[in-house]
Image (cartoon, grey):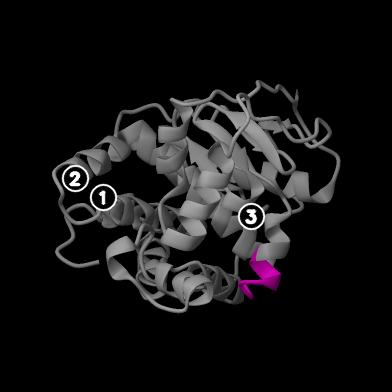
Amino acid sequence: MEWEGGRRSGNIEDRRGLGPVGIAGGGIGAVVLAAIGYFVFGIDPRTTMDVAQGLQQPAQQQGARGEVSDRDGQFIDVIETSNREVWTPIFQREGVEYRPPEAIVLYKEATGTGCGTGQSAMGPFYCPADQKVYLDLSFWRELEGRFGAKGEFARAYVVSHEIGHHVQHLLGADQQARRLGARGQESGSVRLELQADCYAGVWAAHAGEASGGRIVINRSDVQDGLGAAAAVGDDTLQKQTQGQVVPDSFTHGTSAQRMRWFSRGYEQGDPSACDTFSAASL
């Protein structure tokens, strides 16, 4: 993947030098609950954080805003800006304004968010309450070492998936998922996550053209993205963490489903093809 010539918007909030945030009130804390919920029971970390937020509030942090000097930070900046370049005209064609995330927040270990306290053990996540994406860059080591998902495009897929959640928030899909869950219907969370995978594919389909050729994605890069999607499927993660697969606890979809929806977005390049909520099968 070639990205060094890509434009950067500086929409980065760098908290890495601030150290981990403390958790008010003592006790076990939202971040631990969320990590246990995801890696042991398969519960979406954001669900746990929403509940825990009512019990304790995180200390507030504010990092430096703007361009960052390290390569990893610059990469994140380029991918966020590229997503902006892709989604802005797509929204415009529908007569809607695309508003980018408030920031991509880079942090270490733990940090306060609008959804509660976030921790690196939870992996990257999007918080709809403050419209920010949170990322501890140590996740890249986890992605490659534990999950075997290598290559810079695998990282770009992860970032674009989280920005896909922001797109969903702007369009109201997250509310639709909550309504499905409230009615006890087939997991709205899985449909939401698979749609974000599809949106990541839509980004990949248009990134080169939208960047004026500054970003180059080839077929081997796409294979890296598919590898990342497969590595973080619920069935694969559950086999690793608990030795068995429990479909009723799926929150993100199987490896095959995640690969299929990412491929669909990439091959069709049309967000209307990403309507997982109307799909008869996933």
Going 42% across and 50% down the picture, which residue do you hit?
Answer: 44
* Residue 18 appears anywhere in the view: yes
Q: Where is residue 28 in the image (x, y as percent from the top left)?
A: 58, 39
Q: Where is residue 69 in the image (x, y as percent from the top left)?
A: 86, 40
Residue 144 on the magenta span: yes
Reading the image, the residue beneath label 2 is 180
Q: Distance between the residues labelled 2 and 3?
A: 41 Å
Reading the image, the residue beneath label 3 is 213
Q: How far apart are marks 1 and 2 (CA)?
A: 5 Å
Q: Nearer the viewer, residue 115 or 269?
A: 115
User: Residue 188 shows which numbered tag?
Assistant: 1
Going 64% across and 55% down the picture, which residue do you hit?
Answer: 213
Q: Callout 2: 10 Å neighbours few (<14), some, many (20+)? A: some
Q: Quadrant of the C terminus?
A: bottom left
Residue at disc 3, secondary structure: loop
Q: Do the residues labelled 1 and 2 touch (CB within 8 Å)?
A: yes
Mark in the foreground, 2 or 3: 2
Q: Callout 3: 10 Å neighbours few (<14), some, many (20+)? A: some
Q: What residue type is labelled 2?
A: Leu
User: What secondary structure characterizes most of the magenta part?
Assistant: loop
Residue range corresponding to the magenta coloring: 143-150
Q: Where is residue 7 in the image (x, y as percent from the top left)?
A: 69, 41
